[in-house]
Amino acid sequence: IKSATAATAVVLLTGMIIQQRQVLKSTYRNCRGMEGMLRYIWIGDFLPPHIRDAMDKLDNVSERMVEAEIQLEEIEILIGRVELESVDGPRRSPEEQNSNNTSDTADDKEELKKQLFQQYPEVRTKIGLFSTSLDKLAYTIDSINSHRDADVKTRKKELSNNIVALMNSLDRMVSSLNIGVRL
């Protein structure tokens, strides 16, 4: 009876393995081989601790990238407001409006640019803080050791490319104002 039970169990187990072979293959691949599968079963994580640490740091950077994208949108809105101000012309006090001084249009544009940053110092501040935070994110990504792991290298590359894209977007916005921003 014991041998019949064992034979039945073997047949059932073999049938289940054959039926689930695609799932087992993908799990094997996703868990990085047999070692990863065993680690997943016993520890609950298929990655070695040093790789998990690197992936957790990259997850943190990824979350901060979402915040950076939101900050970039805020800067874009702020620059849009500044550009609208430039269309409306410089803000003038009632005394300045009552005086009928006229000047050249080139002088007006230069004065307008100066006034915009004087009236909106938060533009320069936000741009500077955003640029600094992107630099810190780039440094954090560079400081993460990949341990020669392909997945970590790929994620680092993707996040670095995202930072470059955010920096380029910021540069385009600033250049749209046709002024240099000194930080």
Image (spheres, helix red, strand yellow):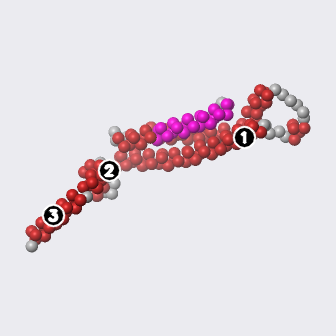
Kindly identify the amino acid type of the residue bearing the numbered disc 1.
Answer: Leu
Viewer-nearest of discs 2 and 3? 3
Pick the quarter of the image with the N terminus.
bottom left
Using residue 175 as the reference point, say whether residue 41 is left or right of it.
Answer: left
Residue at (75, 37) in percent of width and height: 87
Using residue 45 as the reference point, say whether residue 19 is left or right of it.
Answer: left
Callout 3 crowding tier (Cα within 10 Å): few <14, some 14–19, many ≥20: few
Label of residue 84 in the image: 1
Q: Where is residue 59 drawn, in percent x and y?
A: 45, 48
Local SS, label 1: helix
Q: Where is residue 165 drawn, in percent x and y?
A: 52, 38
Which residue is under mark 2? 30
Residue 139 versus residue 175: which sits nearer the camera?
175
Kindly identify the amino acid type of the residue bearing the numbered disc 3.
Answer: Val
Q: Main secondary structure of the magenta part?
A: helix
Residue 39 visible to an observer of this rendering: no
Circle nearer the N terminus (2, 3): 3
